[in-house]
Image (tube, rainbow, N blue to C red):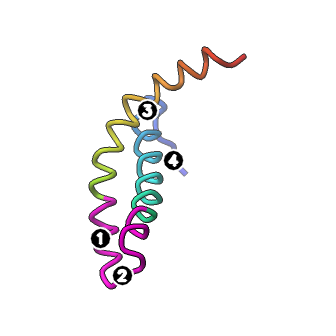
Amino acid sequence: MRKIDRKYYPFLFAGLMSFAMSVIMSAIITWTLCGFCEDFLFKWGNSFITGFAAAFPVAFFISPVVGKIVDAITK
């Protein structure tokens, strides 16, 4: 398997983390709001797209800050 250059690590990390969290959180929130209603998948999809669009830039810019905070408070 061909590996991706390490310089893309911040983009890949933010992308994969925000993707996974958006899928899970949008499903839980959609289920909480409407249960497994007739158009659950449509509502979930819309929620995921909106959530991912917000989550990716947040993850990209916040994860380095959080990493520094964790480094500062751990041995």
Labelled disc at residue 2: 4
The amino acid type, in three-letter code, at marker 2 is Cys
Number of other residues with Cα within 10 Å of mark 1, as a class: few under 14, some 14 to 19, many 20 or more? some
Question: Which element is circle 4 on?
Answer: loop
Would residue 66 be found to the left or right of residue 8 on screen? right
Q: CA distance from mark 3 to mark 1?
A: 30 Å
Mark 3 or 2, closer to the camera: 2
Locate residue 44, reporting x and y percent. Answer: 34, 68
64 in relation to 39, above or below: above
> Which residue bears the numbered disc 2?
37
Mark pair 1, 4: CA separation: 36 Å
Cα separation between marks 4 and 2 = 42 Å
Picture disc at residue 10: 3
Instruction: Name the element at disc 2.
Output: loop
For the residue marked with disc 1, what is the amino acid? Lys
Q: Which residue is mark 1?
A: 43
Q: Bounds of the magenta span?
A: 29-48
Crowd around label 3: few <14 · some 14–19 · many ≥20 (10 Å): some
Front one among 13 and 55: 55
Contact between labelled residues 1 and 2, with CB atoms less than 8 Å apart: yes
The majority secondary structure of the magenta stretch comes to helix
Upstream in sequence: badge 4 or badge 2: 4
| Of pointers 4 and 3, the one earlier in the residue sequence | 4
Residue at point 51%, 47% (across, down): 2
Residue 61 colored magenta?
Answer: no
| Location of residue 33 in the rendering, given as x and y in whole percent from the top left corner | 37, 68
Between marks 4 and 3, how big is the CA–CA gap?
Answer: 18 Å
The amino acid type found where label 3 is placed reads: Pro
Q: Give x and y (percent) for residue 63.
A: 46, 30
Asked if labels 2 and 4 touch by Cβ distance under 8 angstroms, the answer is: no
Q: In the figure, 68 relative to 23: above or below?
A: above
